[in-house]
Image (cartoon, rainbow, N blue to C red):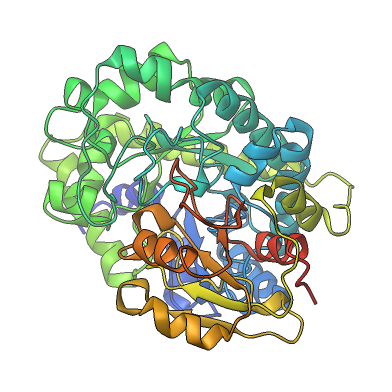
Amino acid sequence: MGRDPGLRRLALGTLLAAYQGPTPPGWAVDLVAEGLAGHTLFGTNVHDPAQVAASTAALRDGRADVLVAIDEEGGDVTRLAHATGSPYPGNAALGAVDDAALTRQVYAAIGLELAALGVTVDLAPTVDVNSADENPVIGTRSFGADPGRVGVHSAAAVEGLQSVGVAACAKHFPGHGATVTDSHHELPTVDVSPAVLRERDLPPFAAAIGAGARAVMTAHIRVPALTGDGPATFSRAVLVDLLRREYGFTGTVITDALEMKGAALAAGGVGPAAVRALVAGADLLCVGARVDARLVEHVAGRIVEAIGDGRLDRSRVEEAAGRAAALAAWTRAAGTAPTAAADGLGYAAARRAVRVEGDVGGLVRPLVVRLHAATTRARGRVPWGLGPHLIGLEELRVVAAETDPAELGRAAGGRPIVLVGRHLHRLPGGAALVEALAAAYPVTVVEMGWPGRWRPAGVRAFVTTFGASHASGRAAAEVLGLAN
Protein backbone atom coordinates (compact mmCIF):
# COMPACT_ATOMS: atom_id res chain seq x y z
CA MET A 1 0.00 0.00 0.00
CA GLY A 2 2.93 2.39 0.33
CA ARG A 3 4.14 4.20 3.43
CA ASP A 4 2.03 7.34 3.24
CA PRO A 5 -1.33 6.75 4.99
CA GLY A 6 -2.56 10.03 3.55
CA LEU A 7 -2.20 8.64 0.03
CA ARG A 8 -4.10 5.50 0.96
CA ARG A 9 -6.96 7.57 2.39
CA LEU A 10 -6.91 9.77 -0.72
CA ALA A 11 -7.12 6.73 -3.01
CA LEU A 12 -9.94 5.20 -0.97
CA GLY A 13 -11.85 8.45 -1.33
CA THR A 14 -12.31 7.75 -5.04
CA LEU A 15 -13.77 4.24 -4.66
CA LEU A 16 -17.29 2.82 -4.50
CA ALA A 17 -16.98 -0.72 -3.19
CA ALA A 18 -19.61 -3.36 -2.44
CA TYR A 19 -20.10 -6.33 -0.13
CA GLN A 20 -22.06 -9.56 -0.11
CA GLY A 21 -25.04 -10.36 2.07
CA PRO A 22 -27.66 -8.51 4.10
CA THR A 23 -25.30 -7.06 6.73
CA PRO A 24 -22.17 -4.98 6.09
CA PRO A 25 -19.15 -7.00 7.24
CA GLY A 26 -16.67 -5.37 9.58
CA TRP A 27 -14.18 -4.60 6.82
CA ALA A 28 -16.82 -2.71 4.82
CA VAL A 29 -17.53 -0.37 7.74
CA ASP A 30 -13.87 -0.10 8.73
CA LEU A 31 -12.86 1.00 5.23
CA VAL A 32 -15.55 3.69 5.29
CA ALA A 33 -14.02 4.99 8.53
CA GLU A 34 -10.62 4.95 6.83
CA GLY A 35 -11.80 7.07 3.91
CA LEU A 36 -13.63 4.80 1.44
CA ALA A 37 -16.10 6.97 -0.49
CA GLY A 38 -18.91 4.46 -0.14
CA HIS A 39 -20.62 1.27 -1.23
CA THR A 40 -23.06 0.24 -3.95
CA LEU A 41 -25.95 -2.01 -2.91
CA PHE A 42 -27.02 -4.93 -5.09
CA GLY A 43 -29.83 -7.45 -4.87
CA THR A 44 -27.80 -9.69 -2.54
CA ASN A 45 -27.80 -6.82 -0.03
CA VAL A 46 -31.59 -6.39 -0.10
CA HIS A 47 -33.93 -8.65 1.89
CA ASP A 48 -36.50 -6.23 3.32
CA PRO A 49 -36.78 -2.50 4.04
CA ALA A 50 -35.91 -2.69 7.75
CA GLN A 51 -32.78 -4.71 6.98
CA VAL A 52 -31.64 -2.26 4.27
CA ALA A 53 -32.17 0.70 6.59
CA ALA A 54 -30.15 -1.05 9.29
CA SER A 55 -27.36 -1.73 6.79
CA THR A 56 -27.09 1.88 5.66
CA ALA A 57 -27.15 3.02 9.29
CA ALA A 58 -24.25 0.66 10.01
CA LEU A 59 -22.31 2.18 7.12
CA ARG A 60 -22.97 5.67 8.48
CA ASP A 61 -21.52 4.52 11.78
CA GLY A 62 -18.27 4.27 9.85
CA ARG A 63 -18.60 7.83 8.56
CA ALA A 64 -21.64 10.07 8.48
CA ASP A 65 -21.15 11.23 4.89
CA VAL A 66 -20.62 7.79 3.34
CA LEU A 67 -22.11 7.47 -0.14
CA VAL A 68 -24.65 4.65 -0.49
CA ALA A 69 -25.50 4.01 -4.14
CA ILE A 70 -27.87 1.63 -5.91
CA ASP A 71 -29.08 0.81 -9.43
CA GLU A 72 -32.78 1.46 -8.94
CA GLU A 73 -34.09 2.34 -12.40
CA GLY A 74 -37.61 1.02 -11.98
CA GLY A 75 -38.83 -1.29 -14.72
CA ASP A 76 -36.49 -4.13 -15.60
CA VAL A 77 -33.55 -3.01 -13.44
CA THR A 78 -34.46 -3.05 -9.76
CA ARG A 79 -32.52 -3.97 -6.65
CA LEU A 80 -35.13 -3.11 -4.02
CA ALA A 81 -37.76 -5.30 -5.70
CA HIS A 82 -35.47 -7.95 -7.20
CA ALA A 83 -37.50 -10.73 -5.58
CA THR A 84 -40.85 -9.69 -7.08
CA GLY A 85 -40.28 -7.16 -9.86
CA SER A 86 -40.59 -3.40 -9.65
CA PRO A 87 -43.90 -1.70 -8.80
CA TYR A 88 -42.90 1.03 -11.27
CA PRO A 89 -42.73 0.86 -15.07
CA GLY A 90 -39.35 1.47 -16.64
CA ASN A 91 -38.15 4.23 -18.90
CA ALA A 92 -39.47 2.81 -22.16
CA ALA A 93 -42.99 2.70 -20.72
CA LEU A 94 -42.67 6.25 -19.38
CA GLY A 95 -41.40 7.39 -22.75
CA ALA A 96 -44.36 5.73 -24.46
CA VAL A 97 -46.79 7.58 -22.18
CA ASP A 98 -44.78 10.76 -22.87
CA ASP A 99 -45.96 12.70 -19.85
CA ALA A 100 -42.96 14.46 -18.30
CA ALA A 101 -44.91 15.23 -15.14
CA LEU A 102 -45.60 11.51 -14.68
CA THR A 103 -41.92 10.65 -15.18
CA ARG A 104 -41.02 13.25 -12.55
CA GLN A 105 -43.60 11.76 -10.15
CA VAL A 106 -42.39 8.19 -10.65
CA TYR A 107 -38.76 9.09 -10.08
CA ALA A 108 -39.66 11.18 -7.03
CA ALA A 109 -41.53 8.15 -5.65
CA ILE A 110 -38.50 5.93 -6.26
CA GLY A 111 -36.33 8.56 -4.61
CA LEU A 112 -38.58 8.75 -1.55
CA GLU A 113 -38.28 5.00 -1.09
CA LEU A 114 -34.49 5.16 -1.41
CA ALA A 115 -34.16 8.12 0.95
CA ALA A 116 -36.23 6.35 3.60
CA LEU A 117 -33.76 3.45 3.46
CA GLY A 118 -30.68 5.65 3.72
CA VAL A 119 -29.62 5.38 0.07
CA THR A 120 -28.13 8.65 -1.16
CA VAL A 121 -27.24 8.09 -4.83
CA ASP A 122 -29.39 6.43 -7.47
CA LEU A 123 -27.32 5.22 -10.41
CA ALA A 124 -30.16 6.32 -12.68
CA PRO A 125 -31.70 7.44 -14.93
CA THR A 126 -30.50 5.66 -18.04
CA VAL A 127 -30.56 8.46 -20.61
CA ASP A 128 -29.21 6.45 -23.57
CA VAL A 129 -31.14 6.81 -26.83
CA ASN A 130 -31.98 3.24 -27.84
CA SER A 131 -31.34 3.69 -31.56
CA ALA A 132 -30.56 -0.02 -32.16
CA ASP A 133 -33.47 -2.46 -31.91
CA GLU A 134 -30.93 -5.25 -31.35
CA ASN A 135 -29.37 -3.54 -28.32
CA PRO A 136 -28.98 -6.34 -25.72
CA VAL A 137 -28.23 -4.23 -22.64
CA ILE A 138 -30.23 -0.96 -22.90
CA GLY A 139 -33.58 -1.61 -24.63
CA THR A 140 -36.46 -0.88 -22.26
CA ARG A 141 -34.07 0.93 -19.91
CA SER A 142 -34.20 3.79 -22.43
CA PHE A 143 -36.95 6.39 -22.70
CA GLY A 144 -37.00 5.73 -26.44
CA ALA A 145 -35.34 6.16 -29.81
CA ASP A 146 -35.99 9.89 -30.28
CA PRO A 147 -33.29 12.14 -28.75
CA GLY A 148 -35.73 14.97 -28.05
CA ARG A 149 -38.21 12.79 -26.18
CA VAL A 150 -35.43 11.04 -24.27
CA GLY A 151 -34.03 14.44 -23.28
CA VAL A 152 -37.34 15.69 -21.89
CA HIS A 153 -37.81 12.59 -19.75
CA SER A 154 -34.17 12.46 -18.70
CA ALA A 155 -34.49 15.96 -17.24
CA ALA A 156 -37.78 15.05 -15.55
CA ALA A 157 -36.26 11.94 -13.97
CA VAL A 158 -33.29 13.90 -12.63
CA GLU A 159 -35.62 16.53 -11.20
CA GLY A 160 -37.82 13.89 -9.58
CA LEU A 161 -35.00 12.08 -7.82
CA GLN A 162 -33.21 15.17 -6.67
CA SER A 163 -36.38 16.87 -5.46
CA VAL A 164 -36.42 14.37 -2.59
CA GLY A 165 -32.71 14.56 -1.79
CA VAL A 166 -31.36 11.59 -3.75
CA ALA A 167 -28.56 12.35 -6.20
CA ALA A 168 -29.22 11.32 -9.80
CA CYS A 169 -26.56 9.80 -12.06
CA ALA A 170 -27.27 10.07 -15.79
CA LYS A 171 -25.79 7.15 -17.72
CA HIS A 172 -23.97 5.90 -19.86
CA PHE A 173 -21.90 8.76 -21.33
CA PRO A 174 -21.46 9.37 -24.25
CA GLY A 175 -24.33 7.00 -25.12
CA HIS A 176 -24.77 3.20 -25.04
CA GLY A 177 -27.96 3.08 -27.10
CA ALA A 178 -26.45 2.27 -30.49
CA THR A 179 -24.52 -0.81 -29.34
CA VAL A 180 -25.42 -4.37 -30.32
CA THR A 181 -23.14 -6.03 -27.75
CA ASP A 182 -23.07 -5.91 -23.94
CA SER A 183 -20.18 -4.09 -22.24
CA HIS A 184 -20.48 -6.48 -19.29
CA HIS A 185 -18.95 -9.12 -21.58
CA GLU A 186 -16.89 -7.24 -24.19
CA LEU A 187 -15.98 -3.76 -25.42
CA PRO A 188 -18.73 -2.57 -27.80
CA THR A 189 -17.86 -0.20 -30.63
CA VAL A 190 -19.95 2.75 -31.80
CA ASP A 191 -18.16 3.76 -34.97
CA VAL A 192 -19.69 7.16 -35.68
CA SER A 193 -18.46 10.72 -35.91
CA PRO A 194 -18.66 13.19 -33.02
CA ALA A 195 -21.26 15.02 -35.10
CA VAL A 196 -23.55 11.98 -35.02
CA LEU A 197 -23.08 11.68 -31.26
CA ARG A 198 -24.00 15.34 -30.80
CA GLU A 199 -27.16 14.91 -32.85
CA ARG A 200 -28.29 11.46 -31.68
CA ASP A 201 -26.75 10.42 -28.36
CA LEU A 202 -25.70 13.52 -26.45
CA PRO A 203 -28.87 15.69 -26.27
CA PRO A 204 -30.30 13.73 -23.30
CA PHE A 205 -27.07 14.21 -21.37
CA ALA A 206 -27.25 17.92 -22.08
CA ALA A 207 -30.81 17.89 -20.76
CA ALA A 208 -29.84 15.96 -17.63
CA ILE A 209 -26.94 18.34 -16.98
CA GLY A 210 -29.27 21.27 -17.52
CA ALA A 211 -31.63 19.79 -14.94
CA GLY A 212 -28.81 19.75 -12.41
CA ALA A 213 -27.76 16.08 -12.41
CA ARG A 214 -25.18 15.67 -9.64
CA ALA A 215 -23.42 12.79 -11.39
CA VAL A 216 -22.84 11.28 -14.82
CA MET A 217 -21.75 7.67 -15.39
CA THR A 218 -19.26 6.66 -18.06
CA ALA A 219 -19.82 3.97 -20.69
CA HIS A 220 -17.42 1.14 -21.37
CA ILE A 221 -17.85 1.63 -25.11
CA ARG A 222 -15.36 2.42 -27.82
CA VAL A 223 -15.98 5.40 -30.07
CA PRO A 224 -12.90 5.27 -32.34
CA ALA A 225 -13.13 8.92 -33.42
CA LEU A 226 -12.82 9.99 -29.77
CA THR A 227 -11.46 7.11 -27.71
CA GLY A 228 -9.16 5.26 -30.10
CA ASP A 229 -8.92 1.59 -29.12
CA GLY A 230 -10.04 2.02 -25.51
CA PRO A 231 -13.36 2.67 -23.81
CA ALA A 232 -14.85 6.09 -23.09
CA THR A 233 -14.15 5.46 -19.39
CA PHE A 234 -10.43 5.81 -20.15
CA SER A 235 -10.76 8.72 -22.59
CA ARG A 236 -9.82 12.27 -21.58
CA ALA A 237 -11.28 13.46 -24.88
CA VAL A 238 -14.68 12.15 -23.71
CA LEU A 239 -14.60 12.89 -19.97
CA VAL A 240 -12.82 16.25 -20.03
CA ASP A 241 -12.97 17.77 -23.50
CA LEU A 242 -16.53 16.65 -24.28
CA LEU A 243 -18.34 16.22 -20.95
CA ARG A 244 -16.76 18.99 -18.92
CA ARG A 245 -15.62 21.59 -21.42
CA GLU A 246 -18.21 21.29 -24.17
CA TYR A 247 -21.24 20.27 -22.09
CA GLY A 248 -20.28 22.19 -18.97
CA PHE A 249 -20.69 19.39 -16.45
CA THR A 250 -19.25 20.30 -13.04
CA GLY A 251 -20.49 17.38 -10.94
CA THR A 252 -19.08 13.94 -10.19
CA VAL A 253 -18.05 11.57 -12.99
CA ILE A 254 -18.76 8.00 -11.88
CA THR A 255 -17.46 5.00 -13.81
CA ASP A 256 -19.55 2.01 -14.69
CA ALA A 257 -18.32 -1.08 -12.83
CA LEU A 258 -14.62 -1.58 -13.51
CA GLU A 259 -14.98 -5.36 -13.20
CA MET A 260 -17.00 -5.35 -16.43
CA LYS A 261 -15.12 -6.85 -19.36
CA GLY A 262 -15.45 -3.61 -21.35
CA ALA A 263 -13.08 -1.98 -18.83
CA ALA A 264 -11.14 -4.75 -17.09
CA LEU A 265 -10.05 -6.52 -20.26
CA ALA A 266 -9.05 -3.25 -21.92
CA ALA A 267 -6.84 -2.30 -18.97
CA GLY A 268 -5.54 -5.65 -17.79
CA GLY A 269 -7.49 -5.82 -14.54
CA VAL A 270 -9.56 -3.73 -12.15
CA GLY A 271 -6.54 -2.03 -10.54
CA PRO A 272 -5.04 -0.75 -13.80
CA ALA A 273 -8.54 0.21 -14.97
CA ALA A 274 -8.94 2.41 -11.89
CA VAL A 275 -5.68 4.23 -12.65
CA ARG A 276 -6.58 4.78 -16.29
CA ALA A 277 -10.04 6.06 -15.39
CA LEU A 278 -8.60 8.58 -12.94
CA VAL A 279 -6.02 9.77 -15.46
CA ALA A 280 -8.83 10.27 -17.98
CA GLY A 281 -10.86 12.43 -15.60
CA ALA A 282 -13.20 10.09 -13.71
CA ASP A 283 -13.85 10.93 -10.05
CA LEU A 284 -15.67 8.05 -8.40
CA LEU A 285 -14.79 4.50 -9.41
CA CYS A 286 -17.35 1.70 -9.14
CA VAL A 287 -15.21 -1.33 -8.38
CA GLY A 288 -18.05 -3.77 -9.12
CA ALA A 289 -20.37 -6.19 -7.34
CA ARG A 290 -17.94 -9.00 -6.44
CA VAL A 291 -15.82 -7.05 -3.99
CA ASP A 292 -13.97 -7.85 -0.78
CA ALA A 293 -11.44 -6.04 1.39
CA ARG A 294 -8.50 -7.51 -0.49
CA LEU A 295 -9.75 -6.18 -3.84
CA VAL A 296 -10.38 -2.70 -2.42
CA GLU A 297 -6.87 -2.63 -0.93
CA HIS A 298 -5.44 -3.85 -4.24
CA VAL A 299 -7.16 -1.12 -6.23
CA ALA A 300 -6.21 1.60 -3.75
CA GLY A 301 -2.66 0.27 -3.79
CA ARG A 302 -2.45 0.52 -7.57
CA ILE A 303 -3.62 4.14 -7.37
CA VAL A 304 -0.98 4.92 -4.74
CA GLU A 305 1.71 3.23 -6.87
CA ALA A 306 0.68 5.25 -9.90
CA ILE A 307 0.97 8.47 -7.92
CA GLY A 308 4.39 7.36 -6.70
CA ASP A 309 5.81 6.58 -10.12
CA GLY A 310 4.33 9.64 -11.82
CA ARG A 311 1.71 7.97 -14.00
CA LEU A 312 -1.02 9.73 -12.02
CA ASP A 313 -0.81 13.24 -10.60
CA ARG A 314 -1.68 13.55 -6.94
CA SER A 315 -3.60 16.72 -7.77
CA ARG A 316 -5.85 14.72 -10.14
CA VAL A 317 -6.69 12.24 -7.38
CA GLU A 318 -7.30 15.09 -4.93
CA GLU A 319 -9.67 16.64 -7.47
CA ALA A 320 -11.49 13.32 -7.91
CA ALA A 321 -11.81 12.65 -4.18
CA GLY A 322 -12.96 16.23 -3.71
CA ARG A 323 -15.78 15.79 -6.21
CA ALA A 324 -16.83 12.52 -4.53
CA ALA A 325 -16.87 14.33 -1.19
CA ALA A 326 -18.87 17.20 -2.71
CA LEU A 327 -21.47 14.69 -3.91
CA ALA A 328 -21.73 13.29 -0.39
CA ALA A 329 -22.04 16.79 1.03
CA TRP A 330 -24.89 17.59 -1.35
CA THR A 331 -26.82 14.48 -0.34
CA ARG A 332 -26.49 15.42 3.34
CA ALA A 333 -27.54 19.01 2.75
CA ALA A 334 -30.42 18.21 0.38
CA GLY A 335 -32.51 16.36 2.95
CA THR A 336 -35.80 14.74 2.02
CA ALA A 337 -38.84 16.69 0.88
CA PRO A 338 -41.89 16.13 3.14
CA THR A 339 -44.01 14.53 0.44
CA ALA A 340 -45.53 11.12 -0.13
CA ALA A 341 -45.92 9.09 -3.31
CA ALA A 342 -49.44 8.48 -4.56
CA ASP A 343 -50.73 4.99 -3.85
CA GLY A 344 -50.60 2.77 -6.92
CA LEU A 345 -48.72 5.40 -8.95
CA GLY A 346 -46.50 2.87 -10.73
CA TYR A 347 -49.37 0.54 -11.63
CA ALA A 348 -51.46 3.38 -13.01
CA ALA A 349 -48.48 4.57 -15.04
CA ALA A 350 -47.86 1.08 -16.43
CA ARG A 351 -51.49 0.80 -17.56
CA ARG A 352 -51.14 4.07 -19.47
CA ALA A 353 -48.16 2.66 -21.36
CA VAL A 354 -49.80 -0.51 -22.74
CA ARG A 355 -50.45 -0.46 -26.48
CA VAL A 356 -52.85 -2.89 -28.18
CA GLU A 357 -52.80 -3.67 -31.90
CA GLY A 358 -55.72 -5.91 -32.83
CA ASP A 359 -58.51 -7.51 -30.79
CA VAL A 360 -57.96 -8.78 -27.23
CA GLY A 361 -61.57 -9.82 -26.66
CA GLY A 362 -62.77 -13.37 -26.13
CA LEU A 363 -59.80 -14.66 -24.14
CA VAL A 364 -61.71 -17.26 -22.14
CA ARG A 365 -59.35 -19.42 -20.07
CA PRO A 366 -56.50 -19.14 -22.59
CA LEU A 367 -53.29 -21.16 -22.49
CA VAL A 368 -50.74 -18.61 -21.29
CA VAL A 369 -47.20 -19.43 -22.43
CA ARG A 370 -44.10 -17.48 -21.42
CA LEU A 371 -41.12 -17.85 -23.74
CA HIS A 372 -37.85 -18.05 -21.82
CA ALA A 373 -35.52 -15.10 -22.36
CA ALA A 374 -31.94 -14.87 -21.16
CA THR A 375 -31.26 -12.16 -18.61
CA THR A 376 -28.43 -9.64 -18.46
CA ARG A 377 -26.01 -8.72 -15.68
CA ALA A 378 -27.67 -5.32 -15.38
CA ARG A 379 -31.16 -6.80 -15.01
CA GLY A 380 -30.35 -9.83 -12.89
CA ARG A 381 -32.77 -12.69 -12.25
CA VAL A 382 -35.90 -10.68 -11.52
CA PRO A 383 -39.29 -12.42 -11.94
CA TRP A 384 -41.38 -11.29 -14.89
CA GLY A 385 -44.39 -12.30 -16.94
CA LEU A 386 -48.14 -12.56 -16.33
CA GLY A 387 -48.04 -15.48 -13.89
CA PRO A 388 -48.41 -13.57 -10.58
CA HIS A 389 -51.43 -11.65 -11.92
CA LEU A 390 -53.61 -14.41 -13.43
CA ILE A 391 -56.99 -15.61 -12.11
CA GLY A 392 -57.19 -19.39 -12.02
CA LEU A 393 -54.61 -19.80 -14.76
CA GLU A 394 -51.02 -20.95 -14.83
CA GLU A 395 -48.27 -19.59 -17.02
CA LEU A 396 -46.56 -22.39 -18.93
CA ARG A 397 -42.86 -21.69 -19.48
CA VAL A 398 -41.07 -22.97 -22.56
CA VAL A 399 -37.90 -22.41 -24.57
CA ALA A 400 -38.92 -21.21 -28.03
CA ALA A 401 -36.20 -22.99 -29.99
CA GLU A 402 -37.03 -26.29 -28.26
CA THR A 403 -40.84 -26.14 -28.55
CA ASP A 404 -43.03 -27.89 -31.10
CA PRO A 405 -45.96 -25.64 -32.11
CA ALA A 406 -48.22 -28.67 -32.47
CA GLU A 407 -47.56 -29.70 -28.87
CA LEU A 408 -48.62 -26.28 -27.64
CA GLY A 409 -51.69 -26.48 -29.84
CA ARG A 410 -52.65 -29.79 -28.28
CA ALA A 411 -52.05 -28.37 -24.80
CA ALA A 412 -54.40 -25.50 -25.63
CA GLY A 413 -57.15 -27.96 -26.54
CA GLY A 414 -59.05 -25.45 -28.64
CA ARG A 415 -58.54 -22.55 -26.25
CA PRO A 416 -56.89 -19.32 -27.39
CA ILE A 417 -53.16 -18.98 -26.79
CA VAL A 418 -51.41 -16.01 -25.19
CA LEU A 419 -47.68 -15.92 -25.88
CA VAL A 420 -45.67 -13.73 -23.49
CA GLY A 421 -42.12 -12.79 -24.45
CA ARG A 422 -39.33 -10.31 -24.07
CA HIS A 423 -37.53 -9.02 -27.20
CA LEU A 424 -39.32 -11.62 -29.33
CA HIS A 425 -37.87 -10.24 -32.55
CA ARG A 426 -34.40 -11.42 -31.52
CA LEU A 427 -35.24 -14.40 -29.31
CA PRO A 428 -33.80 -17.60 -30.87
CA GLY A 429 -36.72 -19.45 -32.39
CA GLY A 430 -39.19 -16.89 -31.07
CA ALA A 431 -40.45 -15.38 -34.31
CA ALA A 432 -40.77 -18.76 -36.01
CA LEU A 433 -42.73 -20.25 -33.10
CA VAL A 434 -45.12 -17.30 -32.89
CA GLU A 435 -45.85 -17.30 -36.61
CA ALA A 436 -46.27 -21.08 -36.79
CA LEU A 437 -48.79 -20.98 -33.94
CA ALA A 438 -50.60 -17.96 -35.37
CA ALA A 439 -51.10 -19.78 -38.67
CA ALA A 440 -53.06 -22.54 -36.93
CA TYR A 441 -54.51 -21.15 -33.68
CA PRO A 442 -55.96 -17.92 -32.24
CA VAL A 443 -52.84 -16.27 -30.80
CA THR A 444 -52.32 -13.07 -28.83
CA VAL A 445 -48.77 -11.86 -28.27
CA VAL A 446 -47.63 -9.87 -25.24
CA GLU A 447 -44.27 -8.22 -25.90
CA MET A 448 -42.64 -7.17 -22.61
CA GLY A 449 -39.28 -6.15 -24.02
CA TRP A 450 -38.19 -3.62 -26.60
CA PRO A 451 -40.81 -4.13 -29.33
CA GLY A 452 -38.78 -3.18 -32.38
CA ARG A 453 -40.50 -3.08 -35.76
CA TRP A 454 -41.37 -6.76 -36.08
CA ARG A 455 -45.04 -7.72 -36.02
CA PRO A 456 -45.90 -11.38 -36.60
CA ALA A 457 -48.36 -12.31 -39.32
CA GLY A 458 -51.67 -13.86 -38.35
CA VAL A 459 -51.91 -12.97 -34.67
CA ARG A 460 -55.22 -11.72 -33.23
CA ALA A 461 -53.49 -9.05 -31.19
CA PHE A 462 -50.05 -7.70 -30.41
CA VAL A 463 -49.81 -6.11 -26.96
CA THR A 464 -46.79 -4.02 -26.01
CA THR A 465 -45.96 -3.16 -22.38
CA PHE A 466 -42.53 -1.54 -22.95
CA GLY A 467 -41.06 -3.43 -20.02
CA ALA A 468 -41.34 -6.47 -17.80
CA SER A 469 -41.74 -4.97 -14.33
CA HIS A 470 -44.34 -6.27 -11.89
CA ALA A 471 -46.41 -3.19 -12.70
CA SER A 472 -46.21 -3.84 -16.44
CA GLY A 473 -47.12 -7.51 -16.00
CA ARG A 474 -50.24 -6.56 -14.07
CA ALA A 475 -51.12 -3.91 -16.65
CA ALA A 476 -50.97 -6.48 -19.45
CA ALA A 477 -53.05 -9.01 -17.51
CA GLU A 478 -55.67 -6.33 -16.88
CA VAL A 479 -55.82 -5.31 -20.55
CA LEU A 480 -56.37 -8.97 -21.47
CA GLY A 481 -59.08 -9.38 -18.83
CA LEU A 482 -57.04 -12.02 -16.99
CA ALA A 483 -55.94 -10.17 -13.86
CA ASN A 484 -56.64 -11.46 -10.38
User: In the image, what residue occupies the spot 46% across and 62% down?
Assistant: 379
Where in the figure is residue 56, as x and y percent of width and height? Answer: 62, 66
Residue 250 visible in this rendered orientation of the protein: no
Q: Quadrant of residue 124?
A: top right
The mark tally for this picture is 0
Residue located 71% across and 73% down the image = 49
| Residue 36: percent from left, percent from top | 43, 56
Note whether 416 is above or below 112 in the view shown.
below
Residue 310 sits above or below residue 370 on the image = above
Closer to us: 212 or 173: 173
Note whether 212 is above or below 262 in the view shown: above
From the viewer's side, name the closer residue of 428 and 104: 428
**Residue 261 location in percent, x, y?**
21, 55
Q: Is residue 428 visible?
A: yes
> Can you say whether 76 is above or below 278 in the image?
below
Q: Residue 297 location in percent, x, y?
A: 28, 63
Q: Residue at x 43, y 46 (%)?
A: 138
Side (left or right) of 198 relative to 146: left
